């Protein structure tokens, strides 16, 4: 059924548009990756909170979240442009112009012609978005090296230069920064932190990574043990870093986990084992001697921090935004004196609050640059299935009608209408009835990014694609053509 001459002719007639759309989409996605500013986007999303643009910007605080609008809007419109004009050019334009009569006058069967053209359109879309997805991966790896390892942040770059080491090498061994005062100062400056808060941040990050590595090892071991146990749910088998933080004793039962955790911290296995025992003892003491001081919730802390920033900015004769961007200014003796009078906090409490604010800001950047390869795969796969489904609509119209104008109106109008509805949905707090009149809602990027249920939507897109392409082949094979 497949015809090489027809496939070759389809490639020759449509490769220019394919190349243009592929290059443009790849460049835009790569630009999104390379220019991502975790702190900047977080500020924009915070400023937009409560406005009609809050839904559009709320996910921009993470690298993959910032790509949501690319996948929902930019990549979709580029895909629609390609599939509408290509589907029209493959079938109805040849029928309308009379060139289809020449093709069908050859020994090639009509069923082979339409089957080959549908294969070309499907294959070209798959190839296009495979290249686009690969370009995105390459850009993320080039800029942050977070696809195959831990992300390269500004402090790691500064420390690597100070240590005369490769950036990737230092990112895997953060303890090297703690061991070198010069590297410590350079790294702290790069992250807009001082040498008091930065070591606290770095130690916390190293500990978290060690727990994550040990959690992965323990989870793998539990899978080997319980993989055939039908009573065990996946959630029960998987061990998270948070669970190990609350119960580090589990690490002691696995030699491989001890080795992995020790490697992250730059310790021997025995020293790391002692570290885990110390953590266990510390947790037991916290249980026996609970904190009897006043508990300040997160909202109250934010209010107090804002009061401290305002008091400090007045004392330093600066704008509050300037102090907020450089929290270490709060530790200035003049600022501390003004802040203590305004809030009745002690000097140590203000210093601790300053350290915690800087650490929280640094950790938010780290979390934003984390690259979830599985989520990225499903974003790319979902986009591909959506474009295939939209292409099936255009291809179906191209085989159903014999006039280019009518085929373009239906085959292009419906996909563009779906796109416009998707744009409106992005600006609305609730999708309402719009969710049920467009197939773009079947590609749920938010569910993919948050670990929600998105599988059935992708299955539905695949079913739409299969049914409409199959129907297109049947219709064209049996219809009367004005040849």
Image (spheres, rainbow, N blue to C red):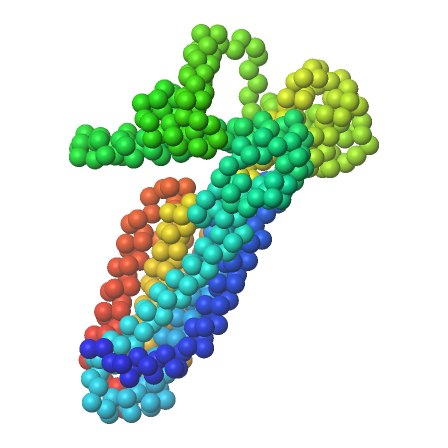
For the residue pair 301 and 156, the one nearer the viewer reads as 156
Give how far across and how far down residue 363 sits, in percent.
Answer: 55, 35
171 on left or right of 475: right
For the residue pair 91 and 52, the one nearer the viewer reads as 91
Residue occupying the point 41% across, 41% down: 450
Residue occupying the point 63% across, 28% down: 197
Relative to 426, say whether 276 is above or below. above
Relative to 204, say whether 149 is above or below. below
Where's the N terminus, which quadrant?
bottom left
Where's the C terminus, which quadrant?
bottom left
Q: Quadrant of residue 98?
A: bottom left
Mark yes or no: residue 52 visible: no
Give how far across and how far down residue 61 sits, in percent.
Answer: 54, 43
Residue occupying the point 60% across, 44% down: 164
Q: Quadrant of residue 365?
A: top right
289 on left or right of 319: left
Give how far across and how far down residue 13 sits, in percent.
Answer: 39, 82
For the residue pair 313 and 421, the one nearer the viewer reads as 313
153 on left or right of 16: right
Query: How many numbered markers are drawn?
Result: 0
Mark yes or no: residue 262 visible: yes
Relative to 45, say whether 121 is above or below. below
Residue occupying the point 41% across, 22% down: 270
For the residue pair 20 and 444, the one nearer the viewer reads as 20
Give how far across and how far down residue 47 sits, in percent.
Answer: 62, 42
């Amino acid at each position: 059924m497949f015809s090489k001459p027809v496939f070759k002719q389809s490639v020759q007639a449509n490769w220019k548009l394919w190349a243009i759309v592929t290059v443009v989409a790849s460049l835009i996605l790569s630009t999104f990756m390379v220019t991502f500013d975790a702190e900047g986007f977080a500020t924009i999303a915070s400023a937009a909170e409560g406005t009609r643009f809050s839904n559009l910007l709320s996910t921009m605080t993470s690298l993959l979240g910032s790509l949501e609008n690319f996948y929902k809007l930019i990549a979709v419109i580029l895909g629609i442009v390609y599939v509408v004009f290509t589907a029209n050019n493959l079938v109805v334009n040849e029928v309308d112009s009379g060139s289809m009569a020449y093709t069908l006058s050859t020994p090639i069967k009509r069923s082979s012609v339409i089957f080959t053209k549908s294969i070309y359109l499907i294959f070209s879309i798959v190839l296009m978005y495979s290249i686009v997805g690969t370009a995105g991966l390459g850009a993320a790896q080039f800029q942050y090296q977070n696809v195959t390892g831990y992300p390269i942040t500004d402090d790691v770059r500064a420390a690597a230069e100070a240590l005369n080491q490769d950036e990737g090498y230092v990112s895997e061994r953060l303890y090297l920064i703690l061991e070198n005062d010069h590297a410590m100062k350079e790294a702290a400056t790069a992250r807009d932190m001082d040498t008091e808060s930065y070591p606290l941040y770095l130690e916390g990050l190293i500990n978290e990574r060690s727990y994550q590595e040990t959690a992965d090892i323990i989870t793998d071991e539990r899978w080997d043990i319980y993989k055939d146990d039908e009573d065990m749910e996946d959630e029960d088998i998987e061990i998270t870093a948070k669970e190990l933080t609350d119960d580090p004793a589990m690490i002691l039962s696995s030699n491989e986990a001890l080795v992995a955790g020790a490697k992250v911290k730059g310790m021997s296995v025995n020293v790391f084992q002692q570290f885990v025992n110390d953590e266990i003892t510390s947790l037991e003491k916290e249980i026996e001697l609970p904190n009897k001081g006043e508990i300040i919730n997160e909202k109250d802390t934010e209010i107090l921090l804002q009061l401290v920033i305002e008091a400090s900015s007045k004392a330093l004769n600066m704008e509050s935004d300037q102090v907020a961007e450089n929290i270490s200014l709060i530790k200035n003796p003049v600022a501390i004196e003004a802040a203590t009078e305004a809030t009745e906090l002690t000097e140590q409490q203000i210093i601790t609050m300053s350290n915690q604010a800087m650490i929280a800001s640094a950790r938010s950047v780290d979390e934003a640059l984390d690259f979830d390869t599985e989520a990225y795969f499903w974003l790319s796969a979902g986009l591909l299935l959506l474009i295939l489904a939209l292409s099936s609509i255009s291809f179906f119209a191209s085989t159903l009608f014999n006039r280019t104008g009518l085929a373009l109106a239906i085959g292009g109008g419906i996909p563009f209408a779906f796109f416009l509805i998707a744009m409106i949905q992005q600006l609305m707090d609730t999708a309402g009835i719009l969710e049920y009149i467009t197939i773009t809602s079947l590609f749920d990027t938010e569910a993919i990014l948050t670990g929600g249920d998105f599988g059935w939507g992708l299955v539905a897109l695949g079913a739409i694609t299969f049914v409409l392409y199959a129907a297109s082949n049947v219709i064209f094979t049996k219809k009367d053509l004005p040849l």
